[in-house]
Amino acid sequence: MSQVPQMQERTVELIVAEREELADDVVGLVLEEPSGGDLPDWNPGAHIDLILTDSLVRQYSLCSSPLDRRRWKVGVLLDPNGRGGSKHVHHELHRGCRIQVRGPRNHFPFQRANRYQFIAGGIGITPMLPMIEAAEADGADWHLLYGGRQRSSMAFVDELSKYGERVTIWPLNEQGMPDLASVLGSPRDDTLVYCCGPEGLLSAVEQFCQSWPKYALHIERFAAKPDAHTPSEEALDNFQVVCQRSGITVDVGPGESILAAIKAKGVSMLASCMEGICGTCEVAVLEGSPDHRDSVLDDDEKAENDCMMICVSRSLSEKLVLDI
């Protein structure tokens, strides 16, 4: 079951203590409490929201050590075709800047196992770093396949070199597409596969892992799956949402999100990505059947129908009762 956040998460003002060019078009930011105090606990796989402006909020994976309570680090790839978040980070956030940060939140949790296969593409390396640290501390057998456009665009390569043959660096301009068959061709029941990166890589890994045990594959997406927002055939154009704790019933019409409908009625709800990938707007479902259109929950979690992302998901039943 996925973890449903509370109505209010902690938002803190942090200072950019360090800024570093990690690779071509990749900057690393180290965030600290201005007073030097401890930051909230987190586990490998967690991400935070950077509240860049009132209308610009973006999620970035924590890539520092969870054991370091004083510092959070994120790596941000400049996306010239993006919606402005990475441009703001690259052009506006410098050492000494203060920024509002919300979280941490974790929909890519690291589970204990005897063996791991980590697969990263580009900036997808960021959530892998604390996972590798945890696997190493546990004495687990682990391996990393890390692909990128070219070596100069791949962050943390020098840091990863200390792990020797456990790490395979795969620049596409030198070696072509990563050899997934070599690491995923033979299913294993003692191995968890963690993968993060662009959609092409994720889709390929999903195909290779179809013959693996169902529990083996863990994926985090930076964008919605290509078919994620496609409605089910049974999806309703009009339905009601009962906000149980708020005591409000809202009519949701065609083309309208649940999130927009309840906000219009004055119900306060945190949200961020508006694409169903960050998990900020996740709520518990008390009654009814959601039409899941997010890229956060896996198939088993969606089948449980006990939570949903209200920025994109809708309803298969005439009424949904939500714990908000």
Image (cartoon, rainbow, N blue to C red):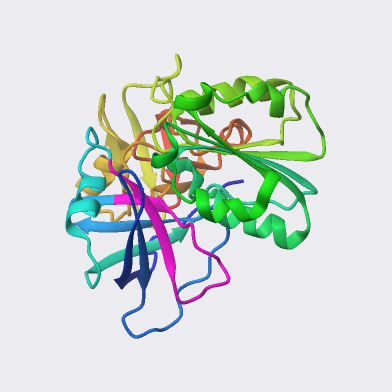
Give the residue drawn at x 27%, y 52%. 57
Residue 63 point in image, percent of width and height: 48, 57
Residue 276 falls in image quadrant: top left
Q: Is residue 187 left or right of residue 84?
A: right
In the rendered image, residue 105 lying in the magenta stretch gets the answer: no
In the rendered image, residue 74 lying in the magenta stretch gets the answer: yes
- Is 284 located above or below residue 98 in the figure? above
In front of the other: 128 or 19: 19
Give the residue drawn at x 76%, y 30%. 213
In front of the other: 123 or 177: 177
In front of the other: 142 or 274: 142
Residue 145 visible in the current orientation: yes
- Magenta-tinted stretch: 58-78
Give the residue drawn at x 44%, y 25%. 173
Q: Is residue 229 left or right of residue 43?
A: left
Farthest residue to the front: give it. 174
Give the residue drawn at x 59%, y 51%. 161
Residue 239 point in image, percent of width and height: 35, 30
Residue 264 point in image, percent of width and height: 20, 46
